[in-house]
């Protein structure tokens, strides 16, 4: 009877216009849906084309009138996006330039696929930063952190660029500082504390106590006084000023110093009293004539240059500061005699009487100068050491000759060299500097001359004649030597061999054109996979570096052009929506959905029947339910990969418990095995992938089963379970590898 009624209702559902009235005892739920690309219905099937379908559960007949639209694709022209180090568009983030395909989600309508071009200035990326520091931490972007930080952050370092930091785990520890321990009085002249000798009273001494895995502790001590120290005071009376350790004092001053060189501290105090002096310039003593050429007066030496100048001094024999005396010299008489004996080399410049004479011969030289009635005699006894000029004869040399001689710097063991390429007598080197050496002991200079004959090499053809095009570089071994070229030459000498007796040059001609490989580096960061359409057209699902010869350039001019892809693949987060998704009409009209994910999530966006919701966290409260509700969750991870979850909260009439199948599946998400437990005997299990294809079919017997998921890729799947009495139930699960 039920089968006949179901066939009748199915016929009626296929022709909606013929429904005059619904059969008695059967509830009909008619749903009209327009979907984009595909639609998953309550029967567990995924429909990719427009259709009319029916599904009966107990006394309720569900009728689906489905229209499936295809997404719109517009990749004829690229939409340019320009930014500093990254761009944001359509809830996506790019940090590398290039061409990308993106999908514009249109609630209630079919999606659009567009091609965009990303143009960036560049980005700096730091790896994970982990450190434990005491007090503060100097971050690479110039900021000093004083508090512990554990976060993922982006630091803006200019108006057009950003510095991306991975996970930042910085622990800032603070040192433990104890109060200063005070010692009232210590015996002797020192006090031992933590191995430190405290020798000054009133001074705080610090010690650092090293502690493992944290900041060191700082302890301190201060001794107020010592027993055994000595004190002395010295009174000083000075006139006008007093100089102490380079400082000129002009007022009364007390200076205390501490001498810690002995066993005890010795305190020395200077009490300096400054008294003003009295000057009486009227009592200037005049010395009309002074014998000799100098005159000593109160520790000052006066010379003929000081004639008719008044000088002042204090009379040390006076008991106070009223003893300023003065003197003025009118003339000097006498002779000043200066004798100099020199042993020199080569020549000597003599400065005498305001003149400079160059002397090159031995002898005795006298200069007499009369200055301000004083006669100055300069007496020079000059002896020259011999200077040698040597001639180095060379019979012949091939192409060039290098002469080695003692260094000009006069340092023992040092040598200088001069290289000549022309015949003749040479007295200067290639820099036109005279060839000379300086004797280490006497410092005398010896000049050298080199007489030589330079032969020109005789050129011999080798018979080698090469005209070739190479890639990057060219190597050739000839005459026992290997030569490498990486530039372009027209004609060059291949190799030369020189000999003093037989001066020859062997050569060949090489016409070489060198081409170089070119590299085109492409850096891409994307989610889940990447298709290198311009070159390999392969799909990559893991981060990698790939090199590919560019099409049309293989063996072009001896070299290839290489495209190098530096690819970083991040993965779309696996998100599971938990909560009650099958409501019974009359029992509940609201449910709470929770998004669960093991990864760090940047944002959640919920949509109810295509309308964006205000909730931005991982929890959505769906209330006031009067019919089935389509829920769309768009989840963006920390690496800016977007996952989309689509579920339907069904709102049905009550189901007869006697006909329902109580099924439990675990774990979900699963990696290798999925366990199924039921209150009833099972008959078969079918697994569908995201596009409705059957990927696993199992016949079972009993109330539990285990599925091996090793052949399945990561993704979302639908499980259809049929009991022994023909009843069915569907469940969603995720494969995460």
Image (cartoon, rainbow, N blue to C red):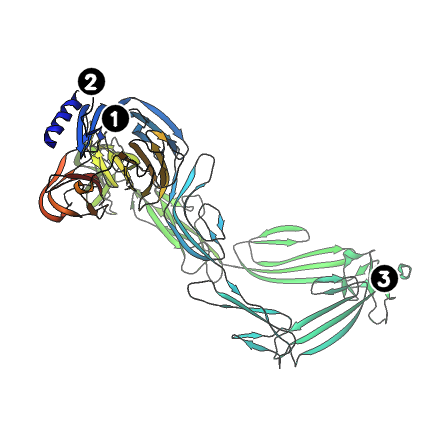
The quadrant of the picture occupied by the C terminus is: top left
Task: Please tell me how crowded label 2 is: few (under 14), some (14-19), or many (20+) other residues with Cα within 10 Å.
Answer: few
Q: Nearer the viewer, mark 3 or mark 1?
A: 1
Question: SS class of the residue under badge 1?
Answer: strand
Q: How far apart are marks 3 and 1 (CA)?
A: 120 Å
Q: How far apart are marks 1 and 2 (CA)?
A: 22 Å
Residue 200: x percent and y percent? 62, 73
406 or 413: nearer the eye?
Answer: 413
Tell me which label, 1 or 2, sits earlier in the chain.
2
Residue 293 visible in the shown view: no
Question: SS class of the residue under badge 2?
Answer: helix
The quadrant in which residue 596 appears is top left
Tell me which label, 2 or 3, sits earlier in the chain.
2
Residue annotated with mark 2: 17
Give yes or no for contact between labels 3 and 1 (Cβ–Cβ under 8 Å). no
The answer to whether residue 78 is left or right of residue 211 is: left
575 or 724: nearer the eye?
Answer: 724
The quadrant in which residue 407 appears is bottom left
Residue 405: x percent and y percent? 39, 54
Residue annotated with mark 3: 326
**Image vertical order of residue 509 relative to residue 354, above or below:** above
Residue annotated with mark 1: 35
Residue 379: x percent and y percent? 65, 60
Tell me which label, 3 or 1, sits earlier in the chain.
1
**Image vertical order of residue 177 relative to residue 76, above or below:** below
Q: Distance between the residues labelled 2 and 3?
A: 140 Å
Residue 660 visible in the shown view: yes
Please state the total of marks drawn on the protein image.
Answer: 3
């Amino acid at each position: 009877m039920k089968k006949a009624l179901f066939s009748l209702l199915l016929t009626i559902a296929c022709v909606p216009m013929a429904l005059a009235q619904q059969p008695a005892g059967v509830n009909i739920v008619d749903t009209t849906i327009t979907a984009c690309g595909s639609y998953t219905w309550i029967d567990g099937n995924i429909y990719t084309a427009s259709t009319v379908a029916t599904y009966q559960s107990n006394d309720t007949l569900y009728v689906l009138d489905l229209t499936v639209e295809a997404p719109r694709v517009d990749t004829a022209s690229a939409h340019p996006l320009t930014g500093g180090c990254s761009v944001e568009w359509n809830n996506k983030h790019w940090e590398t330039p290039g061409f990308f395909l993106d999908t514009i989600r249109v609630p209630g309508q079919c999606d659009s696929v567009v091609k965009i071009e990303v143009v960036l200035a560049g980005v700096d990326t730091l790896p994970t930063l982990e450190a434990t520091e005491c007090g503060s931490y100097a971050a690479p972007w110039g900021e000093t952190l004083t508090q512990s930080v554990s976060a993922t952050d982006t630091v803006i370092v200019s108006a057009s660029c950003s510095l991306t930091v991975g996970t930042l785990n910085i622990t800032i520890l603070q040192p433990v500082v104890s109060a200063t321990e005070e010692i009232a009085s210590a015996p002797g002249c020192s006090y031992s504390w933590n191995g430190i000798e405290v020798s000054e009273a009133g001074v705080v001494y610090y010690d650092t106590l090293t502690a493992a895995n944290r900041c060191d502790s700082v302890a301190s001590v201060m001794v107020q006084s010592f027993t055994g120290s000595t004190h002395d005071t010295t009174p000083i009376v000075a006139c006008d000023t007093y100089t102490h350790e380079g400082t000129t004092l002009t007022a009364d001053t007390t200076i205390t110093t501490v001498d810690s060189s002995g066993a005890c501290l010795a305190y020395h105090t200077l009490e300096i009293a400054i008294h003003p002096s009295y000057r009486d310039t009227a009592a200037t003593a005049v010395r009309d004539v002074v014998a000799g050429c100098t005159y000593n007066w109160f520790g000052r030496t006066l010379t003929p240059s000081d004639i008719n100048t008044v000088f002042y001094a204090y009379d040390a024999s006076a008991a106070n500061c009223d003893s300023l005396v003065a003197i003025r010299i009118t003339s000097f008489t006498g002779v000043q005699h200066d004798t100099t004996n020199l042993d020199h080399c080569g020549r000597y410049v003599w400065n005498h009487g305001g003149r400079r004479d160059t002397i090159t011969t031995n002898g005795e030289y006298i200069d007499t100068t009369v200055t301000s009635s004083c006669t100055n005699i300069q007496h020079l006894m000059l002896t020259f050491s011999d200077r040698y000029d040597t001639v180095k004869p060379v019979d012949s040399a091939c192409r060039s000759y290098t002469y080695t001689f003692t260094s000009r710097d006069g340092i023992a063991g040092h040598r200088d060299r001069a290289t000549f390429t022309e015949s003749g007598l040479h007295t200067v080197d290639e820099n036109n500097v005279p060839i000379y050496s300086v004797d280490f002991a006497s410092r005398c200079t010896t000049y050298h001359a080199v007489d030589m004959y330079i032969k020109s090499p005789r050129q011999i053809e080798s018979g080698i004649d090469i005209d070739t095009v190479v890639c990057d570089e060219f190597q050739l071994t000839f005459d026992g030597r290997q030569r490498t070229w990486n530039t372009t030459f027209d004609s060059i000498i291949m190799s030369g061999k020189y000999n003093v007796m037989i001066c020859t040059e062997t050569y060949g001609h090489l016409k070489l054109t060198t081409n170089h490989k070119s590299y085109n580096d492409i850096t891409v960061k994307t989610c889940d996979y990447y298709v290198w359409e311009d070159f390999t057209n392969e799909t990559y699902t893991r981060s990698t570096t790939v090199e590919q010869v560019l099409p049309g350039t293989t063996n072009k001019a001896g070299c290839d052009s290489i495209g190098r892809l530096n690819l970083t693949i991040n993965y779309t987060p696996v998100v599971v929506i938990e909560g009650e998704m099958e409501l019974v009409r009359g029992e509940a009209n609201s449910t709470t959905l929770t998004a669960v994910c093991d990864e760090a999530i940047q944002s959640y966006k919920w949509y109810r029947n295509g309308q964006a919701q205000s909730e931005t966290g991982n929890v959505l409260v769906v209330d006031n339910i009067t019919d089935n509700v389509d829920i769309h969750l768009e989840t963006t991870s920390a690496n800016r990969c977007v996952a989309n979850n689509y579920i339907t909260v069904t709102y049905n009439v009550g189901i007869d418990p006697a006909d329902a199948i109580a099924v439990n599946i675990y774990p979900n998400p699963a990696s290798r095995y999925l366990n199924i437990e039921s209150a009833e005997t099972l008959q078969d299990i079918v697994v569908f992938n995201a596009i409705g294809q059957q990927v696993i079919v199992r016949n079972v017997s009993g109330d539990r089963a285990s599925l091996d998921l090793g052949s399945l890729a990561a993704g979302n799947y639908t499980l259809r379970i049929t009991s022994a009495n023909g009843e069915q139930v569907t469940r969603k699960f995720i494969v995460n590898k």
